[in-house]
Image (cartoon, rainbow, N blue to C red):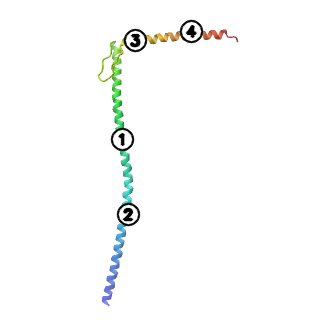
Amino acid sequence: MLSRLLKEHQAKQNERKELQEKRRREAITAATCLTEALVDHLNVGVAQAYMNQRKLDHEVKTLQVQAAQFAKQTGQWIGMVENFNQALKSHTPPTLTPGLPHPTTTFQEIGDVENWARSIELDMRTIATALEYIYKGQLQSAPS
């Protein structure tokens, strides 16, 4: 009877061990599935962040190139304006700046343009006055 009780006890312990081992394997499988699902979910966010970072890097490089071009062009404009101002102040041809187009305008040429503009303006006023006079004359001579 004692040996039978011992055998039953050992059989029940083996069943419990097998059940415990089965549950441990199921828990490990469930934990593995959960871990894989979490990693996959995080990887989607990381991949999106990586793509956004690449786009930002490309935009930064483009902006840097455009800013450098703008700075160069602005420097050229400033040089040209300074040369023009110098020509107006000194009544002499402007100085030549290395790397910039060589100006060909002297103060005398600028004065010639001003005279030309005044002459054109005077001619246009004369024409406008003549046309106004003719128009008024036609209105007065028209039968009512």
Which of the two labelled residues, at mark 2 and mark 1, occupies the earlier sequence position?
A: 2
Which quadrant would residue 31 be assigned to in this image?
bottom left
Mark-to-mark CA distance, 1 and 4:
64 Å
User: x, y (%) of residue 46?
Assistant: 36, 51
Amino acid tagged 3: Gly
Secondary element under disc 3, as helix, strand or loop, is helix
User: x, y (%) of residue 37?
Assistant: 39, 60
Establish if 51 lies above or below 101: below
The tally of labels here is 4
How dense is the environment of label 2, judged by Cα within 10 Å: few (below 14), some, or many (20 and up)? few
- The dot on residue 111 is 3
User: x, y (%) of residue 61?
Assistant: 34, 38
In this image, 55 relative to 137: left or right? left
Amino acid tagged 4: Ala
Residue placed at 50% from the left, 10% from the top? 123
Mark-to-mark CA distance, 1 and 3:
50 Å
Mark 1 sits on what residue?
Answer: 58
Amino acid tagged 1: His
Establish if 132 lies above or below 46: above
Mark-to-mark CA distance, 4 and 2:
96 Å
Which quadrant would residue 12 be assigned to in this image?
bottom left
Mark 4 sits on what residue?
Answer: 130
In this image, 140 relative to 49: left or right? right
Mark 2 sits on what residue?
Answer: 33
Which quadrant would residue 70 be assigned to in this image?
top left
User: x, y (%) of residue 109?
Assistant: 38, 12
Secondary element under disc 1, as helix, strand or loop, is helix
Residue placed at 36% from the left, 37% from the top? 62
